[in-house]
């Protein structure tokens, strides 16, 4: 995901916290507060750009709560934002295998897992995860976009292009595209068709 996935979470008001506040958060969390407090501190640290500190809190928390999907997701996410995709992978897998994620976080975990597989060159796994995610959340344009990228990587160029064309046709607010929506949707079915 690498913070360029469009989730927009990095733009929260918490990201405006000062370095002193982030250090205080980290110190408070290390002082032995509970699971919820430590997790909240780690999220605030990640959102404020203190990703290494967030990771330092999340790793032991994840070890002490191995079946906690929310902790696994946040641990995966912080690894992803640090460019540590290989380390993020097992945390994403745990996050989606255990109950407890909100619908929004489940979508994010599935997108993160699929994207991580793709970045690691595990294209068939990326396609499988993202296809299942799109089936579960058919209206999620980000999932469909990442699926199109993974399809491209597996040589399924026609399917990738059709997916993107349909996404553009159905979601674009550009009046020029809207005027050609029926044609775009028709051609997306078979780009190689001629008269």
Image (cartoon, rainbow, N blue to C red):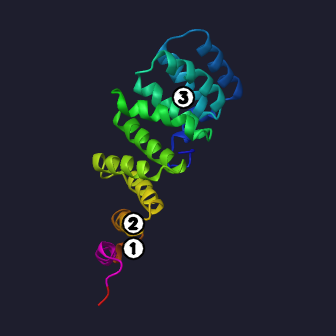
Q: Is residue 138 left or right of residue 127?
A: left
| Nearer to me, 69 or 105 | 69
**Residue 82 rendering spot, x and y as whole percentages:** 62, 38
**Residue 76 rendering spot, x and y as whole percentages:** 51, 33
The residue pinned by badge 3 equals 43
Q: Distance between the residues labelled 2 and 3?
A: 33 Å
Q: Residue furthest top?
A: 32
Q: Give the number of the disc on residue 177.
A: 1
User: Secondary structure of the magenta portion, mostly?
Assistant: helix
| Nearer to me, 53 or 22 | 53
Indicate the secondary structure of the residue bearing disc 2: helix
Q: Quadrant of the C terminus?
A: bottom left
Image point (41%, 55%), residue name: 147
Residue 106 sits above or below residue 36 on the image = below
The residue pinned by badge 2 equals 168
**Would you say residue 39 is visible in this rendering?**
yes
| Nearer to me, 57 or 90 | 90
- In this picture, which residue range is highlighted in magenta? 181-193
Q: How far apart are marks 2 and 1 (CA)?
A: 8 Å
Image point (31%, 52%), residue name: 139
Indicate the secondary structure of the residue bearing disc 1: helix
């Amino acid at each position: 995901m690498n913070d360029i996935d469009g989730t927009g979470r990095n733009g929260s008001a918490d990201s405006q916290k000062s370095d002193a506040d982030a250090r205080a958060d980290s110190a408070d969390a290390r002082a032995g507060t509970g699971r919820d407090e430590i997790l909240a501190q780690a999220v605030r640290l990640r959102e404020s750009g203190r990703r290494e500190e967030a990771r330092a809190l999340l790793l032991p928390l994840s070890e002490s709560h191995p079946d906690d999907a929310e902790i696994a997701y946040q641990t995966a996410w912080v690894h992803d934002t640090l460019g540590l995709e290989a380390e993020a992978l097992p945390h994403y897998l745990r996050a989606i295998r255990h109950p407890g994620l909100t619908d929004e976080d489940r979508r994010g975990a599935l997108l993160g897992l699929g994207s991580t597989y793709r970045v690691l060159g595990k294209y068939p796994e990326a396609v499988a995860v993202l296809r299942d995610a799109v089936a579960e959340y058919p209206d999620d344009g980000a999932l469909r976009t990442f699926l199109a990228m993974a399809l491209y990587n597996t040589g399924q160029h026609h399917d990738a292009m059709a997916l993107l064309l349909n996404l553009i046709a159905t979601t674009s607010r550009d009046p020029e595209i809207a005027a050609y929506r029926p044609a775009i949707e028709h051609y997306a079915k078979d780009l190689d068709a001629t008269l």
